[in-house]
């Protein structure tokens, strides 16, 4: 098993979880000023992890 493919899948899943968490916080009724920073941080980190994981997985060739 290719370690880059596993790491890319892990990054992608972590990015999806962070983006879903940001969406849940955003849809919550009691959003304050401090939660806006958390939402922005989760969206930025989630999208960074998601797109870097997708790029890592798609950039790997199958030799088999």
Image (cartoon, rainbow, N blue to C red):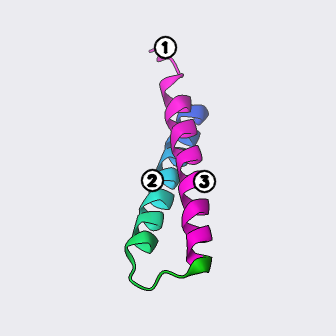
Count of all numbered marks drawn on residues in the image: 3
- Chief secondary structure of the magenta portion: helix
Using the image, determine if residue 54 lies above or below residue 16: above
Q: Please provide the residue range marked out in magenta.
A: 35-64
Using the image, determine if residue 31 lies above or below residue 24: below
In terms of sequence position, does the residue under pointer 1 or pointer 3 come before the other? 3
Measure the alpha-carbon separation of dots 3 and 2.
Answer: 10 Å
Asked if residue 61 lies in the magenta stretch, the reply is yes
Measured from the top left, where is residue 6 in percent x and y? Answer: 53, 40
Q: Tell me the element at label 3.
A: helix
Residue bearing mark 2: 16
In terms of sequence position, does the residue under pointer 1 or pointer 2 come before the other? 2
Asked if residue 49 lies in the magenta stretch, the reply is yes
The residue mark sitting in front, 1 or 3, is 3
Using the image, determine if residue 26 lies above or below residue 52: below
Kindly identify the residue that appears in the image at 48 percent across and 80 percent down.
31
Residue bearing mark 3: 45
Other residues around mark 3 within 10 Å, as few (<14) / some (14–19) / many (≥20): some
Measured from the top left, where is residue 43 in percent x and y? Answer: 53, 56
Q: Quadrant of residue 56?
A: top right
In the image, 5 versus 26, the foreground residue is 26
Q: Quadrant of residue 25?
A: bottom left
In terms of sequence position, does the residue under pointer 3 or pointer 2 come before the other? 2
**Quadrant location of the C terminus in the rendered image:** top left
> Is residue 1 in view?
no
Instruction: Please report contact status of discs 3 and 2: CB closer than 8 Å, yes or no.
Output: no
Residue sticking out furthest to the bottom: 30
Using the image, determine if residue 22 lies above or below residue 47: below
Q: Tell me the element at label 1.
A: loop
Measure the alpha-carbon separation of dots 1 and 3.
Answer: 32 Å
Measured from the top left, where is residue 13 in percent x and y? Answer: 47, 51
Residue bearing mark 1: 63
């Amino acid at each position: 098993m290719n370690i880059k493919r596993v790491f890319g899948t892990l990054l992608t899943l972590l990015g999806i979880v962070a983006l879903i968490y940001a969406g849940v916080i955003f849809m919550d009724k009691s959003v304050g000023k401090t939660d806006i920073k958390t939402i922005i941080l989760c969206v930025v980190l989630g999208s960074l992890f998601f797109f870097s994981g997708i790029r890592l997985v798609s950039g790997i060739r199958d030799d088999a």
